Amino acid sequence: MFRKVAFTMYPVRDVARARRFYEETLGLKPGSVGGEGERAWIEYDLPEGGCLAITNVTGDEPSASSGGTIALEVEDLDALIADLKAKGVTFRSDVIKGPHCRMSVCLDSEGNALLLHQLDK
């Protein structure tokens, strides 16, 4: 029986660069950090649930066009987009309007797609 999604994992090539992106650019706080030698596993627990992990342990290549995509719920999509663009983050889409939300897709430092999502108020 399934209980919940334990985490979403993204592969990274350059762990230090990826950590700077997730911690400095996005402002996420690392939780569990592990690994051995050059192999790393870093988890970012989100305040209202969910966990995003980045790793170079799997040997998989980052990709914006294959595999899953994490959708991060945000409070103010427009302000976040402006802030991230000012920090040089690449966006793959303009704001997309859904029936009850707005969203936009950006790329992390490794080329993985992140969907930024805001429910309508």
Image (spheres, rainbow, N blue to C red):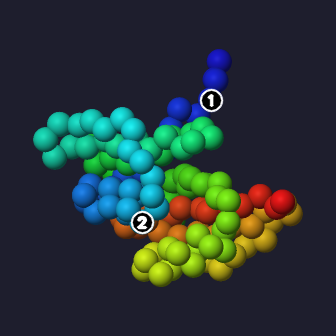
What residue lies at 45% left-to-right and 58% top-to-bottom?
27
Q: What amino acid type is highlighted by mark number 2?
A: Thr
Image point (54%, 44%), residue name:
46
Q: Is residue 107 left or right of residue 5?
A: left
Q: Which marked residue is nearer to the observer: mark 2 or mark 1?
A: 2
Which residue is the site of mark 1? 4
Q: Classify 100 as above or below 81.
A: above
Neighbourhood count class around disc 1 (C-alpha, 10 Å): few under 14, some 14–19, many 20 upward: few
Q: Are marks 2 and 1 in contact (CB under 8 Å)?
A: no
Q: Secondary structure at mark 2?
A: helix
Q: Quadrant of the N terminus?
A: top right
Task: Using the rendered image of the protein, determine whether residue 26 is visible from the camera's viewpoint.
Answer: yes
Q: How many marks?
A: 2
Across and down, in percent, residue 8 comes to 50, 43
Kindly state the secondary structure of the residue where label 1 is placed: loop
Q: Is residue 10 left or right of residue 93?
A: left
Where residue 48 appears, as percent x and y from the top left, is 62, 40
Type of amino acid under label 1: Lys
Horizontal and vertical percent for residue 106?
A: 53, 70
Q: In the image shown, does 82 or 36 lie closer to the viewer?
A: 82
Q: Which mark is residue 25?
A: 2
**Placement of 21 over or under 28, stated as above or below:** below
Q: Earlier in the sequence, mark 2 or mark 1?
A: 1
The answer, for residue 91, to whether it is visible in the render is no
- Quarter placement of the C terminus: bottom right
Relative image position of residue 12 (x, y in whole percent): 33, 56
Can you tell which quarter of the image residue 81 is in?
bottom right
Q: Calculate the distance from the C-alpha at mark 2 to the C-alpha at mark 1.
A: 28 Å
Left/right placement of residue 116 relative to residue 57 reads right
